[in-house]
């Protein structure tokens, strides 16, 4: 855990050293990180996906990584990761509600209706939310969202997520203040995304409590 924290707080230096020492293996490592973060939501909190993509963009600006190769490779990783989560949801969903009777069947039915209507919106917005990006495909699978529809929006949302954050890092990567403080910016992005998620959950909780009073 200490090594992971050290990597996170010095992500720019860690990635820079990796690209210089193991240029080919670095692409494989980045693919594995993005895939794992989007495929398995219990592991998602340990992977700084959004900040990592920004840091990768900064390295691309410094010619340490190929931006087009990164875009296509990590878009594939994000797409496969979400598809894995979706397939796990399709397979485990019926088993969960059958085996654990205490699970609310009404939640399952509401999720089914929600993803039939708003599945595309949920996929696009969740890409930029830590943990949620891995949870949404799983729930989409549990609710049996149409595979073809999920597949189309999965690819598009993955390309948008990877492309926008890598491009942001790429175009800001030559700004001295940003280039020299990439780790702080990565941490800042994580705080903003997680903070926004927690605030939205708190607002929903307060609204529910207000309705019950």
Image (cartoon, rainbow, N blue to C red):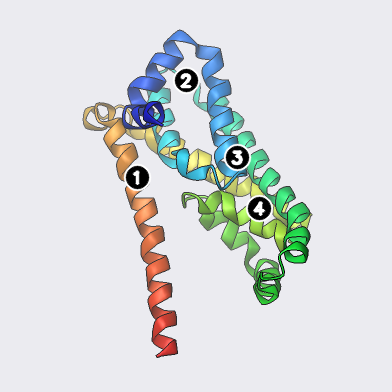
Tell which circle, 4 or 1, labels the residue nearer the N-terminal end: 4
Q: Residues within 10 Å of mark 4 (few under 14, many from 20)?
A: some
Q: Residues within 10 Å of mark 3 (few under 14, many from 20)?
A: many
Q: Would you say the residues marked 2 and 3 are in contact, meaning their CB atoms lie under 8 Å apart?
A: no
Tell which circle, 1 or 3, labels the residue nearer the N-terminal end: 3
Does the rendering let one see residue 62? no
Distance between the alpha carbons at the discs numbered 1 and 3: 19 Å
- Give the label on residue 189, or none: 1
Distance between the alpha carbons at the discs numbered 4 and 1: 24 Å
Residue 53 percent location from the top left of the image: 45, 35
In the rendered view, tell whether residue 55 sits above or below residue 135: above
Label 1 sits on a secondary structure element that is helix
Label 4 sits on a secondary structure element that is helix
In the rendered view, tell whether residue 207 sits above or below residue 135: below
- Give the label on residue 173, or none: none
Q: Which residue is mark 2?
A: 65
- Give the label on residue 78, or none: 3
Frontmost of labels 4 and 3 is: 3
- Give the label on residue 153, or none: 4
């Amino acid at each position: 855990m200490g090594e992971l924290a050290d990597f996170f707080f010095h992500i720019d230096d860690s990635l820079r050293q990796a690209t210089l020492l193991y240029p080919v293996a670095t692409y494989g490592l980045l693919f594995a990180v993005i895939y794992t973060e989007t495929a398995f939501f219990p592991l998602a909190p340990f992977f700084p996906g959004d900040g990592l993509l920004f840091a990768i963009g900064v390295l691309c600006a410094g010619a340490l990584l190929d931006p087009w190769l990164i875009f296509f490779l990590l878009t594939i990783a994000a797409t496969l990761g979400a598809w894995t989560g979706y397939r796990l949801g399709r397979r485990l969903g019926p088993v969960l509600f059958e085996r654990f009777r205490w699970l609310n069947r009404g939640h399952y039915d509401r999720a089914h209706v929600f993803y039939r209507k708003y599945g595309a919106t949920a996929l696009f917005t969740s890409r930029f939310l830590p943990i949620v990006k891995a949870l949404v495909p799983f729930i989409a699978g549990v609710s049996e969202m149409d595979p073809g529809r999920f597949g189309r929006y999965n690819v598009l949302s993955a390309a948008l997520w990877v492309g926008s954050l890598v491009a942001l890092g790429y175009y800001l990567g030559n700004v001295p203040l940003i280039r020299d403080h990439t780790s702080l910016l990565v941490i800042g992005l994580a705080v903003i995304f997680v903070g926004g998620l927690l605030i939205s959950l708190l607002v929903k909780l307060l609204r529910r409590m207000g309705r019950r009073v």
